[in-house]
């Protein structure tokens, strides 16, 4: 057996092997991991690192033949204890290969925990929850050192490992383990050019021989053959589902693509073919598909062709939804801070004031369209908080007129010029161009400090600093696009949530009491998670029952096998990410509005692949936290200020499903009285 060697245990002021190996794999340009690293390879490497951490915590011992439990006492580390507990509960002995593969089954969970920990340390910044892009923090990028604790720093792992490979320096025992794991996982094949790899191969072989435990685990990793050439794809096509009939370019079944995908997922499994939106699609759905999309999105899917005509109609070269690869990562990295949760915290008072203004304008005890009311609130907030203080109220009808026409031609396959040249649409377009010009001009008149920089500042800074990525021809869609995004997300979700509250008086009462306490405490969003817990869970259940993005259209970049079938390159794919929201095996009694699903005890949404309310993969909504907090503040203000009822009281919700799901205009409410 391989006993722990004195002096090789990571000290309290160091990172764990699992954290270091992930940092070594990070691709600083794309925000992902080593180029083309398959998710299975990543999971096996992370699992091996977890076992290595347990070896050096003196909890397990291992060789090629077996893995022995030395001490079952928890390490008090949520990264290591689940694997240790699994080993301790095993009824029979297994070899190291078994435990690597067993631990690798939790690869997504391990990855999420490591990323969250590195973000918490201030080493990385980005979105760890849905495997979005992550980057080194500015402090790490400049100093190439990681902050750990008590003011201590350690040198960047890549600098250490590369210096070790390209010099004759005496190796640190800790770094020898990193080299062994990286070599076994063929990580150096992805980090080094062919010439560089040939130059240091002899040195790598020498270093690997110097560490007994790392070499042993490395041999086990190599026996798993995680990096071999891909298997030959079968020629077996996915099964056909009855296509959604198209009538006048509007989907039958009320256009409910989620219902269609759910029914056929039950009949045909996680992959099938169908015709929808005048196109032939291969549809992936269910938890298997969601997990696949989260980890393999960049490798197998792209979106450029889907948005090409959309951009061309506007004379734009680059819009975020239509970019892939490094340009997408760069633009997302630039625009992301404009939609940060911090912006909600800084402007909470403004958002409350604007919501109250709309409430003041509502007629007493007269029916009001919920969609119109929430569109007004959210559009005003976006213009004032993110759009250089410009009110978009007078453009409320122009925005949906133009963007609905554009999205309909985009996704229903109608030749754009037939619709876009209609006088009504051309007039709406001129109005939106006017709004864009107004925001840009208003921006130029204001001097801002760093804390008050808004979305328009970010777009114009990109134009000045990266004119190829943000040319002048793209300014209109990328400024007015602020409202395109907001028009189909927060207003619709808020209206769905309002309907749920009006139909569940007990929830309305609980949330009203919570809102009153929130305002009594000063209404600061720094306490959103704890002060508005009921509100947060109502939002989560709303997004489960009424998904804003039932499916994601994509183009298949590279062929792959899924569910036993071949998905060829060039195919139109429809990724049914919301199907799991209606599966009783994940969410019991899925038609019941139940906010207790999201308590720590039940945590139904945390099951792998179960809950993706804001999309998945590289194009996941970057403003998800902003949107959720905005909804919370709007709804808390409404309930704190007034009492509302459905109009009529027995109304049953009707939904328009295209271009994005939203309540029909028939959903109306009445303000019964003012509470303040």
Image: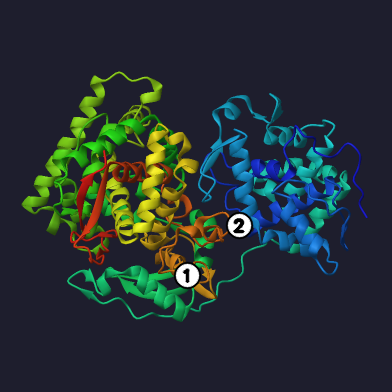
Please state if 446 lies on the left or on the right of 159 as rendered. Answer: left
Residue 162, quarter of the rendered image:
top right
- What SS does tag 1 mark? strand
The residue nearer to you, when weighing 506 against 67, is: 506
Residue 647, quarter of the rendered image:
bottom left
What residue is at 64 percent from the left and 63 percent from the top? Answer: 229
Residue topped by disc 1:
567
Density class for disc 1 (Cα within 10 Å; few <14, some 14-19, many ≥20) is: many
Expressed as whole percent of the image width and height from the top left, the position of residue 527 reads 47, 37
Density class for disc 2 (Cα within 10 Å; few <14, some 14-19, many ≥20) is: some
Question: Extreme left residue here?
Answer: 423
The residue nearer to you, when weighing 257 against 136, is: 257
Quadrant housing the N terminus: bottom right
What residue is at 72 percent from the left and 63 percent from the top? Answer: 102
N-term-proximal mark, 2 vs 1: 2
Q: How far separated are the C-alphas under marks 2 and 1?
A: 18 Å
The numbered mark at residue 344 is none
Please state if 98 lies on the left or on the right of 355 as rendered. Answer: right
The residue nearer to you, when weighing 65 against 315, is: 65
Q: Is residue 314 visible?
A: no
Expressed as whole percent of the image width and height from the top left, the position of residue 69 reads 86, 57
Residue topped by disc 2:
39
Quadrant housing the C terminus: top left
* 672 vs 525: above or below: below
* 112 vs 527: above or below: below
Of the two numbered discs 2 and 1 in the rendering, the one whose residue sits closer to the viewer? 2
* 626 vs 224: above or below: above
Expressed as whole percent of the image width and height from the top left, the position of residue 5 reads 91, 42
Residue 334, quarter of the rendered image:
top left
Please state if 320 lies on the left or on the right of 672 as rendered. Answer: right
């Amino acid at each position: 057996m391989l006993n722990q060697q004195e002096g090789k245990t990571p000290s309290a002021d160091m990172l764990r092997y699992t954290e270091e190996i992930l940092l070594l794999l990070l691709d600083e340009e794309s925000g992902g991991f080593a180029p083309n690293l398959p998710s299975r390879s990543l999971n096996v490497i992370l699992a091996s690192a977890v076992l290595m951490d347990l070896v050096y915590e003196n909890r397990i011992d291992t060789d090629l033949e077996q893995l022995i439990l030395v001490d079952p006492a928890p390490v008090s580390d949520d990264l290591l204890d689940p694997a240790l507990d699994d080993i301790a509960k095993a009824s029979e002995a297994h070899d190291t290969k078994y435990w690597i593969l067993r631990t690798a089954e939790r690869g997504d969970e391990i990855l999420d925990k490591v990323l969250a920990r590195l973000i918490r340390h201030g080493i990385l910044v980005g979105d760890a929850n849905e495997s979005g892009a992550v980057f080194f923090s500015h402090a790490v990028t400049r100093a190439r050192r990681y902050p750990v604790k008590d003011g201590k720093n350690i040198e960047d792992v890549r600098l250490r490992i590369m210096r070790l490979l390209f010099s004759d320096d005496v190796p640190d025992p800790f770094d020898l383990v990193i080299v062994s794991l990286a070599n076994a996982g063929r990580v150096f094949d992805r980090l080094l050019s062919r010439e560089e790899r040939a130059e240091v191969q002899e040195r790598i072989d020498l270093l690997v021989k110097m560490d007994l435990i790392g070499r042993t685990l490395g041999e086990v990793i190599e026996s798993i053959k995680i990096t071999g050439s891909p298997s030959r794809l079968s020629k077996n096509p996915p099964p056909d589902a009855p296509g959604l009939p198209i009538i006048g370019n509007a989907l039958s079944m009320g256009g409910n693509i989620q219902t269609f995908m759910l029914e056929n997922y039950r009949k045909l499994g996680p992959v099938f073919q169908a015709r929808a939106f005048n196109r032939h699609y291969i549809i992936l759905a269910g938890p298997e598909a969601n997990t696949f999309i989260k980890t393999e999105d960049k490798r197998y899917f792209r979106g450029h062709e889907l948005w090409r005509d959309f951009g061309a109609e506007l004379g734009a070269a680059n819009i975020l939804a239509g970019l892939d690869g490094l340009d997408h990562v760069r633009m997302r990295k630039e625009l992301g801070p404009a939609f940060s949760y911090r912006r909600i915290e800084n402007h909470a008072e403004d958002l409350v004031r604007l919501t109250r203004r709309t409430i003041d304008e509502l007629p007493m005890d007269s029916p009001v369209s919920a969609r119109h009311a929430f569109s007004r609130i959210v559009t005003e907030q976006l213009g004032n908080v993110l759009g250089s203080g410009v009110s978009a109220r007078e453009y409320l009808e122009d925005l949906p007129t133009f963007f609905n026409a554009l999205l309909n031609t985009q996704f229903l396959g109608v030749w754009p010029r037939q619709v876009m040249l209609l006088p009504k649409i051309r007039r709406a377009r001129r109005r939106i161009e006017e709004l864009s010009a107004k925001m840009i001009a208003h921006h130029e008149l204001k001097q801002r400090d760093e804390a008050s920089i808004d979305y328009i500042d970010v777009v114009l800074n990109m134009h000045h600093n990266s004119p190829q990525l943000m040319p002048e021809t793209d300014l209109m869609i990328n400024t007015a696009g602020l409202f395109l995004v907001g028009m189909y997300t927060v207003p619709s979700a808020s209206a769905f949530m309002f309907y749920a509250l009006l139909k569940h008086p007990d929830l309305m009462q609980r949330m009203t009491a919570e809102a009153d306490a929130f305002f009594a405490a000063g209404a600061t969003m720094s306490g959103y998670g704890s002060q508005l817990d009921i509100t947060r869970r109502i939002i989560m259940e709303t997004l489960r029952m009424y998904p804003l993005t039932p499916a994601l259209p994509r183009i298949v970049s590279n062929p792959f096998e899924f569910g036993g079938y071949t998905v060829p390159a060039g195919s139109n794919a429809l990724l049914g990410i919301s199907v799991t929201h209606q599966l009783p095996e994940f969410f019991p009694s899925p038609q019941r509005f139940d906010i207790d699903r999201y308590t720590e005890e039940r945590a139904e949404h945390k099951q792998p692949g179960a809950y993706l309310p804001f999309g998945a993969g590289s194009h996941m909504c970057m403003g998800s936290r902003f949107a959720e907090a905005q909804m919370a503040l709007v709804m808390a203000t409404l309930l704190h200020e007034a009492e509302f009822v459905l109009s009529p009281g027995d109304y049953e919700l009707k939904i328009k499903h295209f271009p994005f799901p939203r309540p029909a205009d028939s959903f109306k409410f009445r303000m019964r009285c003012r509470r303040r």
